Image (tube, rainbow, N blue to C red):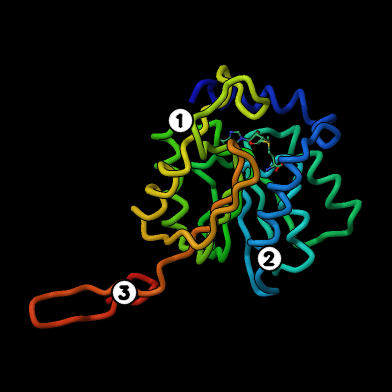
Amino acid sequence: MKKSLEEHAARFDDEATEYDDSSSEEYRACAGLVIEHARRGSDDVVLDLGTGTGAIALALAPEAKRVVGRDISEGMMTKAEEKAAEEGLENVEFGYGTFREPEYDETVDVVTSNFAMHHLSDEAKREAISVIADLGPETFVLGDVMFFDEPDPEVPFYSPDVDDPATVGFLADAFTDVGFSLTAVERVHDQVGVLVAERTPKSVAETPGQIEETATDGSE
Ligand SMILES: C[S@@+](CC[C@H](N)C(=O)[O-])C[C@H]1O[C@@H](n2cnc3c(N)ncnc32)[C@H](O)[C@@H]1O
């Protein structure tokens, strides 16, 4: 992580008022794909990490049972709460939480994150993906700055002083290492994409002379 949590939070507190007015075409495409992949059913509980001003959380709330947004910037979440009130959404809540300590231990069906995880170092991303897997969602939809090719530091999605994006290959490995399968890879730009990771439905454990199925909840 190139900046501390406090530095990132202060930076986004300062940006919160104008944040919604300054989105790029690629950001909008990425957010749209995250929403499309995460919109699954009215019984779903969704956890949106790095929720910011609630772009993903608020779009999913009308069709979900409950949406929980977590972020480190109080300024960004204040904006999200104002928007939720304006839209009359009562099934969405926001509170402090980080990727590695989301401050959430209830049931979750879908985890989403858009344009936020690239602030973490690769090692921290790997830890965060492991923490998210332990929460037990069926689906994790990650939209973010990520490298499909050799990165060009001149293009607008990559600010080496604050951003630390991973390669798509690194993220794919981090997902599969904790039991997810990648079911969709959407390339928005050579530095922006959406990955959909689903819980591997059944893992088949082979012992000599015996094949047994392991239930999705990890019980045997
Ligand atoms: C570029 S904004 C994206 C906000 C929103 N997801 C969207 O799509 O508009 C990145 C957000 O990630 C948050 N963030 C940065 N590092 C974080 C961390 N370690 N844990 C949780 N949130 C973090 C920032 O405070 C900021 O609100």
Which mark is nearer the camera, 1 or 3? 1
Circle 1: element type: loop
Q: x, y (%) of residue 3?
A: 54, 21
What type is the residue that disc 1 sits on?
Answer: Ser
Q: Is residue 153 left or right of residue 128?
A: right
If the image is split into quadrants, where does the C terminus sit? bottom left
Q: What is the crowding at mark 2: few (fewer than 14 residues within 10 Å), some, or many (at least 20)?
A: some
Q: In the rendered structure, which disc, 1 or 3, sits on the residue that comes first in sequence?
A: 1
Q: x, y (%) of residue 184?
A: 54, 59
Residue in front for this viewpoint, 99 or 168: 168
Residue in front for this viewpoint, 89 or 216: 216
Q: In the rendered structure, which disc, 2 or 3, sits on the residue that comes first in sequence?
A: 2
Task: Name the residue beneath numbered marker 3.
Answer: 219
Q: What is the crowding at mark 3: few (fewer than 14 residues within 10 Å), some, or many (at least 20)?
A: few
The answer for how far apart the CA atoms under marks 1 and 3 are is 33 Å
Q: x, y (%) of residue 208?
A: 8, 77
In the picture as drawn, the residue positioned furthest to the right comes out as: 86
Q: Residue at x 76, y 23 (%)?
A: 14
Circle 2: element type: loop
Task: Name the residue beneath numbered marker 2.
Answer: 39
Task: Name the residue beneath numbered marker 1.
Answer: 121
The answer for how far apart the CA atoms under marks 1 and 2 are is 29 Å
Q: x, y (%) of residue 27?
A: 72, 40
Q: Residue at x 77, y 35 (%)?
A: 24
The answer for how far apart the CA atoms under marks 2 and 3 are is 28 Å
Q: Residue at x 54, y 54 (%)?
A: 185
Image: 205 above or below 32: below
Circle 3: element type: loop
